[in-house]
Image (spheres, grey):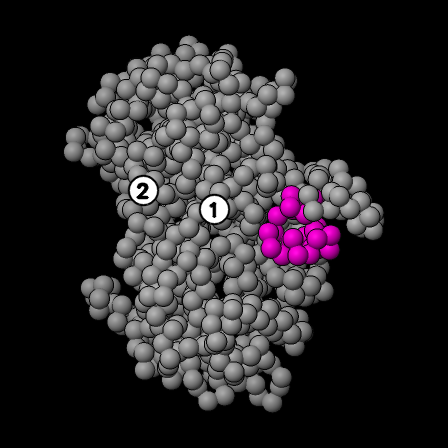
Amino acid sequence: MTETLGELAYNLRWSWHPATVELFGALASSVWAATHNPIAVVRDVAGDPRRLEAHAPQLLALKGDLAQYLARPSQVPGAPRIAYFSAEFAIADCLPIYSGGLGVLAGDHLKAASDLGLPLVGVGLLYRYGYFRQAVDGAGYQGENYDYLQPRDVPLRPLLNEDRQPIVVATPFPGRNVLARIWCAQVGRVPLYLLDTDLPENREDDRWITGHLYGGDQDTRLRQELVLGIGGVRTLRLVLPPDQQPTLLHMNEGHSAFAALELARERLVAGLANSFDEALLQVAPRLAFTTHTPVPAGHDVFPSELVEAYLAGFRPMLGLNHQQLMRLGRANPTDDAEGFSMTALALRSAARRNGVSQLHGVVSQEMWAGVGLTVRNVPPASEMDSVTNGVHTATWVGADMSAFFDRTVGSDWRSVPDEAESWRALAKCDLAELWAARTAQRARLLLRIDGWLSAGGPDGLASDVTAERALVIGFARRFALYKRAGLLLSDGDRLLRLLHGTRRPVLVVFAGKAHPRDDAAKLLVQRIVQAARDERFRGRIVFLEDYDTLLARLLVQGSDLWLNTPRPPLEASGTSGMKATLNGALHLSELDGWWDEAYAPGLGWALGQDISDDLDSEARDAAEARQLMDILEREVAPLFFERHGLDYPREWTQRVARSIMTLAPAFSAQRMVREYAQRVYLPAGATYGQRPGGSAVDVPLPLESYGSIPGTASGFY
């Protein structure tokens, strides 16, 4: 039974399989509640076989269920092999190697690929200290703490060679090779390979390359991206047999763009191309690139001297001089003052490029219109498609709404959530039953909030903020100025009247982290915290510290209204609103990102309509703050609190049912990944005829070119 429990624990499919999570809780309830880590559960029961024997029927049933899941036929037959590169992945609470939306999207992409049976592998970095834990001090100012991640304490396994030695990949650095051990997180049917430079064979500063996510200076960031891009490609060569090498590399943001240079180098060394331009021409159709933000700070740009310092020994392998290399990474290749943009490199390297919503595709096309390719027969880099983001349905839907969906639309919503027909059953659902599920999830959120508040001081929630009565407004995301978290606080007196309305209690819940180096965003966090501590708002405005995936699930599952107030057009997509609508929240948002294409009257509310585009940012903020309060006072609150003699708000709940029915299938991660398959992955496979292995390298280079066990890894300079 111990081996069976280990099989369940080491396959992260449990992160979206409630029955397996229930078993972990039943075996070691206190351990699971404290850690959400199945490896801790395995170790806790190791000395008590009676506990395992008592749950033997469940263990065997779940083992069989997992085996059936892994053996399902692919829903995308004929798909080529894909490698999906990302700097961060959010898969499970116990594996904190993500900071926010990019990582959550990457994790949902892998989960959906597993559900669909796509032959996909993930490639990322294993950060020993991850992203920071947020702690707010007495003045409301954000501080950062870091927890050490021991890989053997979480569901990760080291990749070993035939001699049971760790497989180590080498990335060439000036005068040395940086070695990385490779760990594997099994995400259903998808292996995720994570590179870890914390090895004694490395220099001390190189061991810290995979220390913190987004926590270092530009030098550290560049080194991380060299390991991810170049080391990531070499990892695939080391760990996958020739017939399983990927046809297509999908770069999730520009952090992994150095992969394109490594692919070009392979072709040059193998004699398959006579020049870098020819190599890039061959590689470009086998690269896909997704850009996630129009915000300049979201695009890494490195000083030319720093790039030269790290690539001076590598670029001769490409037949490039310094200026030629720099032009690959400049939006304007003739501007010698520009730094080296990873996004520009990715755009110039990949023949398939997309934004993450329809509007973002248009914005990105305009933003990068000046970037062009120097190789022939490849579309200009400014040609930008779009594939709108989606969320992994089974991961984000709460227990009570899941049970309601099982009864109402059938159990297939988990495996094929993008099938619109099954969701149409919600048009005739029992509204009282839907409201009961919503109330149960709201109650769970309020209970946790009240417990957290009471633990931190004498005050909990206001006495009239109860699951049966209160309207809960959620705002949770990364704190950046363009997201305008403070818009709701613009008119304190008006907000006070809304929150203290007679027989209409309203609770506003904020959560989110500011980047450690974004002082302006930290001041915004402080402003929200101080509002929550203000006597006038205490118990009615709440800021929850240390926003992570566990807290995110509670918030999207328990909120009634999900608020999103970005300054357009800076919200590329946004996915938190998708998760909230899945759970029966209604969405009130700026018409930006996904909401620009999702909104229709009767589904939620649109902010920013009828406000002139000619206003400056300050005037527009003021106008939208007034409009936001108008919508809350005149539309949202009356609709939520009007009962018409019933035990639930009929019109509100009808709108909830219509919102889920319309939006759940359209904005699922399965729809998103299926769309990538049809529009990006399958065309790449068709172009290259599914040759054995479908590799981006026709003649594999010797494995010694990439690394092996410690002490034998080789490099180029």
For the point 47% across and 76% down, the residue is 459
Residue at the spot of label 1? 147
| Magenta stretch bounds | 18-42
Q: Nearer the viewer, residue 235 or 615?
A: 235
Side of 568 where 53 appears, left or right: right
**On the image, which quarter does residue 252 sit in?**
top left
- Are circles 2 and 1 on residues that touch, CB within 8 Å? no
x then y, percent, for residue 208: 40, 34
Q: Amino acid at mark 2?
A: His
The answer to whether residue 455 shows anywhere in this view is yes
The quadrant in which residue 139 appears is bottom left
Residue type at mark 1 is Asp
- Magenta span has 168? no
Between residue 237 and residue 126, name the one nearer to us.
126
Residue in front for this viewpoint, 63 or 372: 63
Q: Which residue is label 2 attached to?
A: 299
The x and y percentages for residue 578 are 50, 59
Mark 2 closeness class: few <14, some 14–19, many ≥20 residues within 10 Å: some
Q: Quadrant of residue 244?
A: top right
For image coordinates 49% across by 70% down, the residue present is 453
Residue at position x 30%, y 49% from top?
517
Label 2 secondary element = loop
Label 2 vs label 1, nearer the camera: 1
